[in-house]
Amino acid sequence: MQTFAGMLSQNRLSLDREACEALQINVGLLCNQACNHCHLEAGPRRKEIMDQATMAQVVEFARRGDFTGIDITGGAPEMNPSLPLLIESLRPLTPRLMLRANLTALGQAGQQELMGLLARSQVVVVASLPALNPSQTDAQRGSGVFASSLDVLRKLNALGYGQEGSGLELNLVSNPAGAFLPPAQSQAEERFRAQLQRRWDIRFNQLYTFANVPLGRFARWLRQSGNYDAYLEKLIDSFNSCAVECLMCRRQVSVAWDGYLYDCDFNLAAGLPLGGRRTHVNELSAPPKAGEPIALGEHCFTCTAGSGFT
Amino acid sequence: MAEYYDRKDLLNFGEIGSEAPELAKKFFDYYGEVFQEGELTAREKALIALAVAHAVQCPYCIEAYTQACLEKGSNLGEMTEAVHVACAIKGGAALVHGMQMRRLAAKLSM
């Protein structure tokens, strides 16, 4: 099997860090869903969530880092009770604060206040909606998720999210509901925009189409369904050397729920720490420097397949 | 059927050009051009190809265009409707030949 490092070397490419611009914060693996494609195996039974002490350390790191973007993810970040505090603390520290919202968790009772805070703080909401039909969406994310997700998207629209001129950005993410690659982003965005507006009167800003990463629960499903080898071959065959230049891991650092650092959320799932050794956010006086190597694994082929994962 | 159809045939399809490379090149160039975005989107063309694959009952094409349709963002409902279109045309084509049968039978019958 071709290794990712081998592929880079064959193409005379290297994957090293550049100036670090973005901070990704994973506030925990607790989630109200157990999506079949989740590389972190997040779910309702997971206990790992970021506590307030670690959050305070992450906020201090963010203050030292001068990041142009900060991206909060999970699990379902909405299920961390300290999320509002984190948002308020991070808001002054970056021009672009993003929340990867699990729409169904955001729609649960008692979350109206959080929605209001997101809007007041002009947090960019990035939400998963894999498909325009319940069968594929529910197959990936759980029964009833499609209908609940549309309800929450409507609520976000009512707050101004996705509406022209509001300054409130609502972006959607579509991951394939199976062992196949995603469609081209621009064509899929056009179709999502037309259908969401016509059928459900829902608006959004941008759609991102990302391939699923063969780690965690998705890797297990691939193996159980007999698709693992063919999927990996497809990722390898779709290697796009031009995508290497724009990979997000070059310019970001990812901090896990326990404060330890990784090059990206996928390396976190794979257990490949930043710089090859476990480093706590508290130990770094500044973000990782340009030129430092990035930990590689076969899952990296996901981010270089086709137009890439940036 | 396994003796007649082998999945690897599709992966090695390019080898068909070994005896007549110019013809194969013309065919594959044409094939590639057909599936480019045009008045129809690549997604719509993949759905048409899936329907035709069923009409001509080509297992290679069914595999290739099931994958292509999913990768271009089509869902199972759309793909099933495409197969029904193929089925309706195939069935209709058989049935409309019944008119020929009726004409011939009428001519032969008292």
Image (spheres, rainbow, N blue to C red):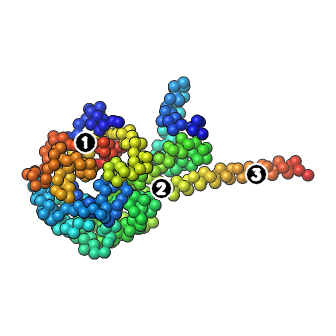
To which quarter of the image does residue A299 belong?
top left
Q: Using residue B36 as the reference point, say whether residue A95 is left or right of it.
A: left
To which quarter of the image does residue A233 belong?
top left
- Amino acid identity at mark 2: Asn
Viewer-nearest of labels 2 and 3?
2
Where, quadrant-wise, is the N terminus of chain B in this rendering? top right
Viewer-nearest of labels 3 and 1?
1
Query: What residue is pinned by disc 1?
Result: A296
Query: What residue is pinned by disc 2?
Result: B75
- Amino acid identity at mark 3: Gly
- The disc placed on residue B98 is 3
- Disc 2 and disc 3: Cα gap in Å? 35 Å
**Cβ–Cβ under 8 Å for marks 2 and 3:** no
Return the x and y of residue A48 as percentages of the image width and height: 23, 61
Q: What chain does mark 3 sit on?
A: B
Identify which residue, A71 or A110, lies in the foreground: A110
Question: Which residue extends farthest left?
Answer: A285
Return the x and y of residue A248 as percentages of the image width and height: 25, 48
- Disc 2 and disc 1: Cα gap in Å? 33 Å
Identify which residue, A139 or B47, lies in the foreground: A139
Kind of element beneath mark 3 = helix
In this rendering, is residue B38 above or below A84?
Answer: above
Q: Residue at x 78, y 49 (%)?
A: B100
